[in-house]
């Protein structure tokens, strides 16, 4: 009897090993190594509003796709040595996202914060249209229009005079509120591989502070902000050795694609049979003993 059980156990171990081998990726289950992408969109022409009304010197520039969007928006009456307005500039990227290769920057937003007169007012809200497309898989065509809120804080003599949170410790940080990015989701299952697309915000040089409303007790800068939205704090201008420099803050929108091998149900059943058989053989042996 001991010999028979030993033979059975060896056979079941072999079945388990075969099942594990069947789960391991092979040449016929080809991994897609990279995905081509492109982005487009911008600030919708004529959509911006100004604090206190009026036009606050709004200037839209650099047309994109669709035709009513612009990659640059400036505002305010300059009150600085550069005679420059404050502005937002959007840069689109196109290229490849490497599967399981980490984050890839797909869009960039730069806020250039110059001193402008309080009497000239400033941009208060603007509508932003954004689009992300996987060019070889056009069913992944994500687009959205959202309203961005903005507060151009008053410049103060010291940081201590700033009202509210001031994470960048300038005098004083300006603040945007934006909607969250599309969360992680599975967009493709092919050749037993499952692909997940994810997005995130990042400030590469820490020139912007990114805080999620409702997370870790943070209630938000703007009254009534929805949980899950993001407040983006940006730098105020600085003067070093008497030389004026605008505050420049950079925000990246990044994407990544992760793949995992998903065996067929029949393969999982074979593995389960092998492991269950090992347990059965063990119980039979104990009874025989």
Image (cartoon, rainbow, N blue to C red):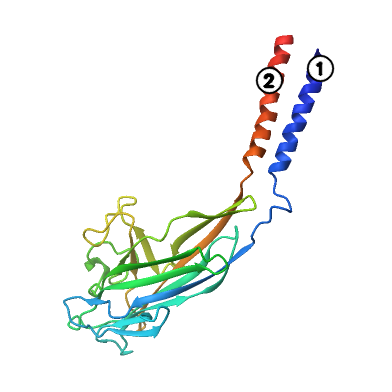
Q: In this rendering, does residue 140 appear at all?
A: yes
Q: Quadrant of residue 22?
A: top right
Where's the C terminus, which quadrant?
A: top right
Along the line of sight, the residue nearer the viewer: 48 or 159:
48
SS of the residue under disc 1: helix
Q: Can you tell which mark lies on residue 280?
A: 2
Residue sitting at x 57%, y 67% = 136
Q: Position of residue 57 (x, y in %)?
A: 25, 85
Relative to residue 75, is residue 131 drawn left or right?
right
Residue sitting at x 34%, y 70% = 234
SS of the residue under disc 2: helix
Q: Position of residue 32 (x, y in %)?
A: 64, 60
Q: Earlier in the sequence, mark 1 or mark 2?
A: 1
Q: In this rendering, does residue 248 appear at all?
A: no
Residue sitting at x 45%, y 73% = 108
Q: Position of residue 101 (x, y in %)?
A: 60, 60
Query: Is residue 190 shown above or below 73?
Result: above
Query: Is residue 122 shown above or below 1?
Result: below
Relative to residue 2, is residue 213 drawn left or right?
left
Relative to residue 83, is residue 40 drawn left or right?
right
Disc 1: which residue: 4
Cβ atoms at labels 1 and 2 below 8 Å apart: no
Q: CA distance from mark 1 to mark 2?
A: 13 Å
């Amino acid at each position: 009897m001991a010999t028979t059980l030993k033979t059975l156990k060896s056979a079941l171990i072999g079945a388990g090993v075969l099942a594990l081998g069947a789960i391991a990726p092979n040449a016929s289950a080809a991994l897609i190594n990279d995905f081509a992408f492109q982005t487009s969109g911008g600030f919708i022409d004529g959509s911006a509003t100004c604090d206190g009304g009026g036009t606050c010197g709004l200037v839209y520039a650099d047309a994109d796709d669709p035709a009513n969007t612009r990659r640059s928006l400036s505002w305010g009456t300059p009150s600085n040595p550069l005679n420059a307005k404050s502005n937002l500039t959007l840069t689109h990227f196109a290229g490849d996202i490497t599967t399981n290769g980490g984050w890839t920057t797909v869009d960039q937003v730069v806020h250039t914060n110059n001193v402008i007169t309080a009497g000239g007012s400033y941009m208060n809200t603007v509508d932003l249209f954004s689009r992300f497309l996987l060019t070889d898989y056009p069913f992944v065509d994500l687009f959205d229009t959202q309203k961005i809120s903005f507060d151009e804080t008053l410049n103060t003599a010291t940081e201590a005079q700033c009202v509210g949170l001031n994470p960048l410790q300038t005098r004083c940080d300006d603040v945007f509120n934006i909607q969250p990015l599309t969360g992680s989701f599975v967009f493709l299952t092919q050749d037993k591989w499952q692909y997940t697309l994810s997005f995130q915000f990042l400030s590469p040089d820490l020139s912007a502070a990114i805080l999620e409303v409702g997370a870790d007790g943070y209630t938000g800068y703007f009254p009534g902000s929805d949980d899950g939205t993001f407040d983006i704090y940006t730098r105020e201008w600085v003067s070093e050795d008497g030389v004026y420099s605008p505050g420049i803050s950079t925000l990246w929108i990044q994407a990544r694609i992760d793949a995992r091998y998903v065996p067929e149900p029949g393969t999982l059943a074979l593995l389960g049979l092998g492991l269950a058989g090992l347990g059965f053989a063990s119980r039979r042996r104990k009874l025989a003993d």
